[in-house]
Amino acid sequence: MASISKQIKKSLKLRKKILATALTLSLVAPVIGPAASFADDQGYTGNEGEASPYTGLGAITTYKVKAAEGQPEIEVAEQDRILSLDDKKFRDANDNRRLDAYEDWRKPVSERVADLISRMTIEQKAGMMYINTHTPALNPADGKFVTDSNSRMITNSKLRHVIYRQSPNVGDVANYNNQLQQLAEGLELGIPVVVTSNPRNSASTDYTNITNATDQHTFWPGTLGLAAGRDVEAVSEFAEIAREEWRKAGIRKVYGYTADIATDPLWARIQETFGEDPKLTGDMIYEVISGFQGDGHTLDSDSVAITVKHFPGGGARDDGKDPHFEDGSFNIFPTEGSLKKYHIPPFEKAVEANVSSVMPYYAYPSNESADQGLPWFSETQQFEEVGMTLNKGMLDYLRAPISEGGLGFNGYVNSDTGAVAGSAWGAMHLSDVDKVAKAVNAGTNLISGGGTPGLVIEAVKSGKLSEAKIDESLAYTLTEMMNLGLFEDPYVNPEEAIAVVNDEEHRADAYEAHQKSVVLMRNDKIKGQKLLPLTEERLEEVKLYVEGFVGVAAPRNHQNPGQYIIDESEKQSAAFTENLKEKLAETYPNITIVDSLDEATLAYVYVEPVQSNWDNNPRITVGPETGVTDVDAIVDIQKTVPTITAVNFTNQWLINELEPNAAAFIGTFGTLQEAVFDVITGEFNPVGKLPFAIPASAKAVEREVGDVPSFAPEEYKHFTYRTKGGDKYEYGFGLSFNEGQTTGKPAHAGDTGKPGHSNK
């Protein structure tokens, strides 16, 4: 890091080192980084495919008092926990047959919270300081998702926040929630459980993953696809629909969405962002929060709380390395003022929307950064070089009033998983107890991963952490619980959950978002006529060859990830190809699907490169290292017949081999193939715009500046890919059928690829 730092101080640019070893995944030796202590709380659940239909598995009996004027809904698993007083009904959470202040929904939430905290033991308080992954039994024959063995974090460790990562049908999710709540109802004080999940309405490489299936959440394009659609109102609609689905399933908190700006094309987590424009990202983050939490910006019983991440902006990487790993443990900002100019603005919008909680990143801010205009840690150091979760200066800036130069955040801070344990970068020399004390004293209120409340207890007993500081954190999280209505009714109806995710209007809205996410990047003339759209008359003359090249990420800690990627990618590619051919034959009976290029007049090639965050081996080449096992075959197809080439951009892939020989080129972002073919056939006029620029070459990536968007004046001026025809695949680029190249400018911006705010 020292040599990089010296270069930065001289040039204020972060020079990328794209080495051959970083772009080629070994087929012999594993390249997985060392497992860290966050491993128990992370992990891609896998592509579950079609969700099993709802069967009523695990349903429990509850007793409900319906909501009425002056009476909230009350629901319990034990009927005698319903208290009657003054013609009102209450939930007797602690089962003492009298109404205590924290059970009285008529009282101010602050009074209820204070009363509850006063009744809690230090053991109960310590358990409430943690959130950890809870793994229920999947499709248990006896219907018991919550068992004696998997419930110990609730009963013994006294946690009341859990992360849920599975993707069965939402009826099973609802019954899982109900079983958790039934368990918690029978424990001391009757504090309910907050079920949390990563985003689950789109495809994902490394996190909760779904497909377009009945009885699962509605399936939308990824966040990059929503950004490509440029429709902020549609994002608001998405969030409102998703909120209803999550609420009905019992998931009341989102580990998302991501406000990070995609400034380093090598970073594997770009897939989770809204792209590289701080203004567009901020606008979309604002709408997501408003949609999930409520337009009134106050949580209520219909809300789902948002945890925006990763403060103060995880996109400023060093060679794309991620701070889940020690090799990527720092944020570095080589451009003066880039943090406040490009990375902080989306978090300002999140705070404006009254986001419930903020998740800092693992990384520590490097003192080799240029001056970022924040209060200095000391006379000689701009930053305290400890992870953001333990970094008092950063968290004080987050909470400081706007009038004093801060962001004015008044919610709570939720650590990233393991950020106070095995990934507490800059503080690894501290004991586990000292790490906890440092994080909480710095302003972290909920610790993710591990579930070790004994450390909190020891920190209090040793005087390193005051119990008053613990109470301060609990006031935040218990206030959220009460505002969400969980103390009155934590239960949900699985039939309602199934109904809402299968709502045809909601699915139609999601499908329209898929259509809007398609970016037409190239459309050549073939025999004097633009290849696209393939209207119905032209389709009758088409003999179409179809092939998919679909990459697969290796499971975490796999012993031979390179070979796994090749083997599984070939299987997935073959399955994708056959499935798509069947769909096309059914949807377009006037197209002749052929199995040989010799017979074809036209080809469609779909390319889905993949890199996982878990191998910490950043790469954006398209080849075996990203699951595309035979690029030469793609080029051969393109040279044999006019070829429509579609590429799924979870990263800013290097397309130097894929684009030059294509007759038409399409960008997708977790987009359904049906929506792509709506564009190809002219059923939908493309409106999508690139949410980031495409790099010109590996050399351009080597020279790009790692902490600014492509359109920033500080960026390497030759960063962007240019076609032989002269088109630049810059931010905001996109073609349409009616007008040729669209202007590509966001509503707030100037010319294509360079928003008007970029020089401010």
Image (spheres, rainbow, N blue to C red):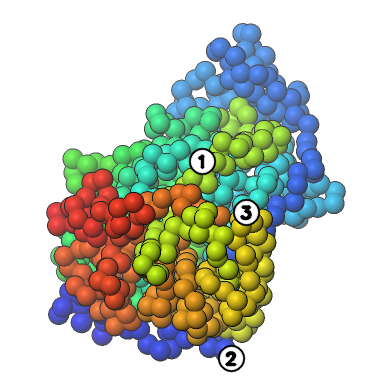
Mark drawn on residue 28: 2
Residue at the (32%, 45%) spot, across then down: 283
Q: Is residue 183 left or right of residue 205?
A: right
Using residue 572 as the reference point, say whether residue 695 is left or right of it: left
| Label 3 element class | helix
Looking at the picture, how far across and down is residue 575, in whole percent? 67, 69
Instruction: Residue type at mark 3: give it.
Output: Thr
Residue tagged 1: 509
Task: Assign a secondary structure to mark 1.
Answer: helix
Among numbered discs 3 and 2, the one appearing first in the sequence: 2
Q: Is residue 508 visible?
A: yes
In this rendering, is residue 712 above or below 353?
Answer: below
Residue 1 spot, x, y in % from top left? 31, 81
Picture quarter containing residue 50? Answer: bottom right
Whichever of callouts 1 and 2 sits on the residue coming sooner in the sequence is: 2
The mark closer to the camera, 3 or 2, is 3
Percent x, y for residue 213?
Answer: 65, 50
Badge 2 density bin: few <14, some 14–19, many ≥20, Cα 10 Å = few
Q: Quadrant of residue 590?
A: bottom right
Q: In this orientation, which residue lies closer to the viewer: 30 or 573?
A: 573
Q: Position of residue 498 (x, y in %)?
A: 68, 38
Q: Amino acid at mark 1?
A: Asp
Name the residue type under label 2: Val
The tag on residue 587 is 3
Q: Quadrant of residue 264?
A: bottom left
